[in-house]
Image: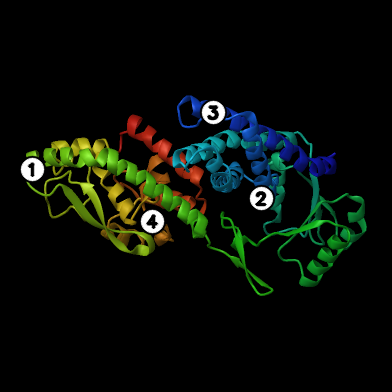
């Protein structure tokens, strides 16, 4: 059952993906023509487009949904496929449908396909997980060598039934537990009768034995995976670099080290910040500036040096919310702070004081989402108190961030709060995805509307 499913799933996925893409294109045609973006096309005009989708999806092998892949992996794969599809459509199809290439139809086509096909593929991914969790489409696995981190892997197999990995036990000379099938030498005698798909090798197994296990696996068409030692179990995705025929592990590589990820995030920042600047800041700055000037003397903006990416200093912009004072850089705002003006209090509780930071985004100093930048004196203090504090400066700081939507915003009253901030910032940096950014932005809007307890 398991191999039959693995054999036919790519064909089933590809066929259904083609059919759903055709329906999606037809639906988009009806919707977009209804709002005047598209001129309604006939069915035969969309069949070539769906075949183009099939070609791109097949070449990219989108049908390969890994057992341990999360949903963001499925959607990131789809995002790249949509990118290629939209580009190819613009070149090959749209010029024949309209007298000139139009940007809006191309972008709406891509966005529509991303939403509709994303829903389909996540549904397929969810159904696969449920199917495997019920004991179907499984793969048999053993671990050669027990100790170190191998029991943790066995626990993952036990807990995550949706991975579809049927753990048969250990082969180890020292271990003696109910999951131990025998010594390492027994593995070579029993493995042939276990119908194995996967062999996991304990990190401390002797090199000669590792080679012997791999040679055995090659002869019996079994996949082999090494279990990294405890020092490499860093709760992050590891990648590899190749120097000729020599491989090394990239221990502290982060998702935004990828040129594609970095460009995608920066492009979104520029588009979003430009829209905010044109449609909101263009009238908000003069209005708020006038109110600030009417209440107190001093500049409209409060400009403060903060640490950005790679600890580089930049001028962080905010609407001035306090009367000018000598302690703005060193003393945090507290509840009922006498320095805060009346208009400043409104700006701070509504977070409108931070709106000028969209200009920092356009300048390249900040991102929409990222670790919130602290003042330079705060950074100097915290980096001596908290381990790996400076690692939060690997990427551009953000107007909002994961720590802020998890409740750690505003005044820092105790060490637990800053440690939690750093922990969440580290998680964000090591697990960045476009979907994570979207989730944080949506959560930020919810926090601004319904949770103002720490905003003062």
Q: Can residue 335 be seen in this view?
A: no
- Please provide percent x and percent y for residue 280: 27, 38
**437 to the left or right of 136:** left
Which residue is denoted by mark 2 in the rendering?
Answer: 60
Which of disc 1 and disc 3 is earlier in sequence? 3
Q: Do the residues labelled 4 and 1 touch (CB within 8 Å)?
A: no
* SS at circle 1: loop
Which residue is denoted by mark 4 in the rendering?
Answer: 396
Q: Are marks 2 and 1 in contact (CB under 8 Å)?
A: no
Q: Are marks 2 and 4 in contact (CB under 8 Å)?
A: no
Instruction: Give the CA separation, mark 2 to mark 3.
Output: 30 Å
**453 to the left or right of 391:** left
Instruction: Give the CA separation, mark 3 to mark 4.
Output: 44 Å
Residue visible at 31% across and 34% down in the picture: 453
Which residue is denoted by mark 3 in the rendering?
Answer: 40
* SS at circle 2: loop
When asked about the image quadrant of residue 353, the answer is top left
Viewer-nearest of discs 3 and 4: 3
Instruction: Give the CA separation, mark 2 to mark 4.
Output: 31 Å
Residue visible at 52% across and 26% down in the picture: 31
**121 to the left or right of 183:** left
When asked about the image quadrant of residue 174, the answer is bottom right
Which of disc 3 and disc 2 is earlier in sequence? 3
Which residue is denoted by mark 1 in the rendering?
Answer: 296
Instruction: Give the CA separation, mark 4 to mark 1.
Output: 33 Å
- Please provide percent x and percent y for residue 124: 67, 35
Viewer-nearest of discs 2 and 1: 2
């Amino acid at each position: 059952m398991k191999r039959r499913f693995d054999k036919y799933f790519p064909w089933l996925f590809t066929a259904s993906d083609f059919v759903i893409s055709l329906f999606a294109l037809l639906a988009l045609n009806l919707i977009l023509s209804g709002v005047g973006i598209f001129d309604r096309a006939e069915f035969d005009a969309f069949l070539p487009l769906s075949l183009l989708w099939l070609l791109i999806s097949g070449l990219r092998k989108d049908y390969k949904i890994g057992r341990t892949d999360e949903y963001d992996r499925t959607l990131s794969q789809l995002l790249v496929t949509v990118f290629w599809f939209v580009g190819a459509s613009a070149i090959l199809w749209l010029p024949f449908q309209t007298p000139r290439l139009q940007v809006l139809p191309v972008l709406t086509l891509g966005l529509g396909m991303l939403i509709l096909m994303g829903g389909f593929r996540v549904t397929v991914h969810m159904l696969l997980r449920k199917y495997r969790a019920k004991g179907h489409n499984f793969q048999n696995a053993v671990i050669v060598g027990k100790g170190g981190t191998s029991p943790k892997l066995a626990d993952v197999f036990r807990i995550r039934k949706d991975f579809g990995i049927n753990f048969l036990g250990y082969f180890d000379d020292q271990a003696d537990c109910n999951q131990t099938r025998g010594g390492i030498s027994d593995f070579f005698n029993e493995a042939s009768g276990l119908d194995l798909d996967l062999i996991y090798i304990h990190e401390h197994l002797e090199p000669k034995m590792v080679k012997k296990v791999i040679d055995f696996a090659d002869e019996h068409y079994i996949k082999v995976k090494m279990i990294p030692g405890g020092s490499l179990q860093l709760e992050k995705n590891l990648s590899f670099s190749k120097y000729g025929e020599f491989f090394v592990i990239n221990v502290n590589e982060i998702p935004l080290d990828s040129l594609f990820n970095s460009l995608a995030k920066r492009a979104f920042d520029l588009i979003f910040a430009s829209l905010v600047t044109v449609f909101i800041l263009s009238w908000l700055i003069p209005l708020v500036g006038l109110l600030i000037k009417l209440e107190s003397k001093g500049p409209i903006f409060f400009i403060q040096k903060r640490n950005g990416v790679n600890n580089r200093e930049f001028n962080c912009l905010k609407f001035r919310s306090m009367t000018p004072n000598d302690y703005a850089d060193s003393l945090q705002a507290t509840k009922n702070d006498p320095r805060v003006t009346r208009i400043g209090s409104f700006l701070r509780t509504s977070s409108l004081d931070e709106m000028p930071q969209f200009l920092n985004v356009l300048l390249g100093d900040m991102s929409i989402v990222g670790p919130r930048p602290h003042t330079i004196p705060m950074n100097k203090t915290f980096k001596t108190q908290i381990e790996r504090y400076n690692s939060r400066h690997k990427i551009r700081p953000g107007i909002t961030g994961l720590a802020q939507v998890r409740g750690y915003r505003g005044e820092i009253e105790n060490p637990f709060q800053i440690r939690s901030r750093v922990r969440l910032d580290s998680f964000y940096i090591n697990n960045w995805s476009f979907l994570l950014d979207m989730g944080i932005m949506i959560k930020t809007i919810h926090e601004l509307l319904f949770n103002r307890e720490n905003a003062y």
